[in-house]
Image: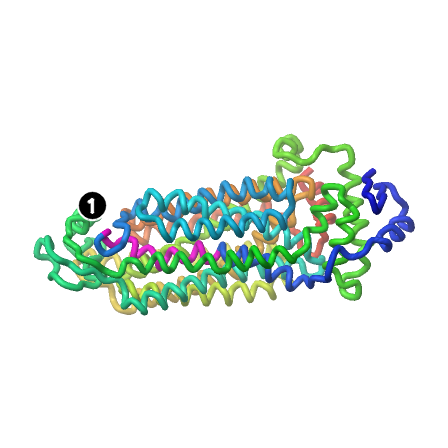
Amino acid sequence: MSTNNQLDIRLDMPRAELDAAVAKVPAGGKHRSIGLIALVATLGSFLFGYDTGVISGALPYMYMPFGAHGLEITASEEGWIGGTLLVGAAVGALIGGRLSDRYGRRHNILLLAFIFAIGAIGTALAPNIWVMYPMRFVLGFAVGGASATVPVYLSETAPKRIRGRIVAIDQVMIVTGQLLAFTFNALIDNAVGGPQLDVAGNTQGHLQTGTQTWDNVLALQTSRGGPFDPAAWHSFVNALLVDGGNGMAWRVMLMLCTIPAIALWIGMRFMPESPRWYAANRRYYESIGALKQVRDPHRDGDPADEFDEMLVSHRREEGQKKGTFGDIWRTPWLRKLFLVGVFLAICNQTTGVNTVMYYAPKVLQYAGMGTSASITAQTANGIMSVIGCSVALWLIGRFRRRQILITCLFSVFVTLGVIALLFEVTIAPAITEGGRPPSWAPMVILAMMGLFMLVVQAGNGPVVWTMLGEMFPSKVRGIANGTAVFCMWMVNALITATFPTMMEGLGGGITYGIYAVINLVFAFILIKIMPETSNKSLEEIEVYAEARYS
């Protein structure tokens, strides 16, 4: 039994009494449409997208010497600028899931908005790499917390009829944030005229003194047909006498993130808590009030029907403790379901999607494109991502989750395979012979990246995030989702940290070939183990999952 001052709800209450009790409860506040709730909550996902996307344009400026206001980073440090954010995201997803279960989804999003602002300011003002790393970790904590909390909040708040589409909007906001980051990167880059530095001396005869474009310095690397291997090139750059430059541009790119963080904090103060979080904590009066606040009875049905489904789920859980990770691991069917969720989370990253999101300008430079051109070209990948996520809103309502995701992985195998072949057959031989790749090569690479982003964002991202928000039972939803997303971010961190050195040491052909094969193998594994959650309420999914994995 659960007792509120205003209401007494019994789990074994007859339906007629339950209907009468629900009818007595007023809405918890002013009606909020699910569209407005999604718009505000997904500002957290917008920040997730902006913070992960902005670094692609900032990194070329960070490579520049301190004298040009860069950070003088190496390929390994470049990887860990991305990697520390993602380790922070893994921790944020894990802890965020626990905080979300304990204090509420809305409370968690408000806290994350504050952390987003602190992380953005800290990274933008970092004087060196050793301050950058912890500030990127803080920012990553907010990113991971948002990735674990926002989809659950939307899944628990949205009506069954549009839950898939509402959670898919979360993905649209992520890629919109990335697109806006790419766009601002390009605008800032064009405003400052591309990366430049004022060389005063110690050029060893390889550069003229005076203002030089960063592309002229990059061209001295062996990977671009120059005389210096990576270690010698960094030694050369560090020894240059530099009087100035426009490397400060990366700070402006990073600082812009504070604006949507403030908007998220303000907006969420006017949004309701998740009705299912209230119900899971036996706060039934508030649950009914919140449910009435976000439902249109003419389109979503009688709130009493939905509340009754929650009670049916709670009757099955009566007498059980609040779900913990130990409960998941000791219950065979929950353990299997959890491991499938972890595998889905890993599949979200092993597509290699973030090698494009973070490092597309770097890859395009290896293919022969200039720095400013590659930063601008990245906006094309952002546009294709937004188109892909928009297509996903239609796909996820028309096709089954399994169909979409498995088809996506087979398509990723093809697109990454083509990129690998282009590097191995065309680009690498041209560089080895001391020349430059043909002018069409980077354009074809860019086109394949765009097709790749279209496929991944239309299939992989929306399906995985939707399923992680809906596939776990309510008593362990926060901890299970948070742990699965923790694993996702740790794999993302590993990929992000190693990709620059893989490109530098193995080349584009072998690097992208590895990712192509991984996706082919994972597609066949999903055929065997992946559940189907389409067109089921959260309570129906729980019954189905227990039956399937018992």
Q: Is residue 519 visible?
A: no
**Within-10-Å neighbours for mark 1: few <14, some 14–19, many 20+:** few
User: What residue lies at 11% left-to-right and 61% top-to-bottom?
Assistant: 209
Q: Residue at x 66, y 40 (%)?
A: 476
At label 1, the amino acid type is Ala
The image quadrant where one finds the C terminus is: top right
Badge 1 is on which residue? 231
Would you say 263 lies left or right of 512 here? right
Magenta stretch: residue 52 in it? yes
459 in relation to 349, above or below: below
Q: Residue at x 70, y 57 (%)?
A: 535
Q: Say which of 352 and 131 sits in front.
A: 131
Q: Nearer the viewer, residue 296 or 418?
A: 296
**In the image, residue 527 lies at what x, y percent?**
57, 49
Q: Is residue 123 on the magenta stretch?
A: no
Which quadrant holds residue 1?
A: top right
Q: Where is residue 348 in the image (x, y as percent from the top left)?
A: 50, 50
x, y percentage for residue 95? 55, 40
Judging from the image, what secondary structure is the residue with disc 1 in? helix
Could you tell me which residue is drawn at 67 percent across and 36 percent down? Answer: 323
Give the vertical position of 400 relative to 472 (above or below): below
Number of dots carrying numbers: 1
Q: Quadrant of residue 478?
A: top right
Q: Main SS type for the magenta part?
A: helix
Looking at the image, residue 485 sits to the left or right of residue 292; the answer is left
Q: Give the range drawn in magenta.
A: 49-66
For the question of whether residue 269 can be seen, the reply is yes
Q: Which residue lies furthest to the left in this view?
A: 205
